Image (cartoon, rainbow, N blue to C red):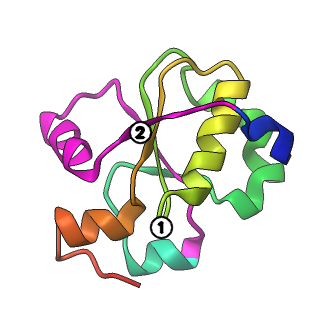
Amino acid sequence: MTENSFSQLIAHISVQELSQRLASGDPSIQLVDVREPQELAIARIEGFVNLPLSEFPEWGDQVPTIFNPQAETLVLCHHGIRSAQMCQWLIAQGFTNVQNISGGIDAYSKLVDPSIPQY
C-alpha cells in the first residue's frame, strides 16, 4: 500500500450501527479486522476476518478472491486509522461498498460492549 492510494473519501459507520448490523445476522456483510494478532488476543468481535496490515504482502493479492468487491465491506482496527487505509485500498481495488468503522474496537468497547477489553 502506498500513500497515493489513500486520496479518496470513504464512508463511515458508527459502532452503534455496527452493533445493529451484527445483531441483524446479515450473512452478506463482509467484516475485515486489520489489527495485529497480539491485538486480537486482547480484544475481538466475532465474525471478522483478520488481515493484519503488517502482513499485506502475504494476503494483498488474495483479497479479490476472498471477498466480493460488490458486497458491503466493513473494516475495523483499534481507533479507525489503519482501517481507513484499508478502506482506501479496497476502493482502489474496485470494491464498491466499503465503510470504515469510526473509532474502531476502542469505541465499540466504550459505547457498545464494555465486556470487550480496552487496550
- Quick one: SS at disc 2? strand
C-alpha gap between disc 1 and disc 2: 15 Å
Q: Which residue is mark 1?
A: 78
Looking at this view, is 83 or 27 the one in front?
A: 83
Q: Position of residue 92 (x, y in %)?
A: 72, 26
Q: Position of residue 99 (x, y in %)?
A: 45, 35
Residue 65: name its quadrant: top right
Q: Position of residue 85 (x, y in %)?
A: 65, 48
Residue 64: name its quadrant: top right
Left or right? Give the position of 63 relative to 119.
Answer: right
Res 91 seen here: yes
Which range of residues does the magenta coloring cover? 8-37
Res 1 seen here: no
Q: Is residue 66 magenta?
A: no
Q: Is residue 12 magenta?
A: yes
Q: Which residue is mark 2?
A: 12
Looking at this view, is 34 or 80 the one in front?
A: 80
Left or right? Give the position of 77 relative to 110.
Answer: right
Amino acid marked by disc 2: His
Point out which mark residue 20 bears: none
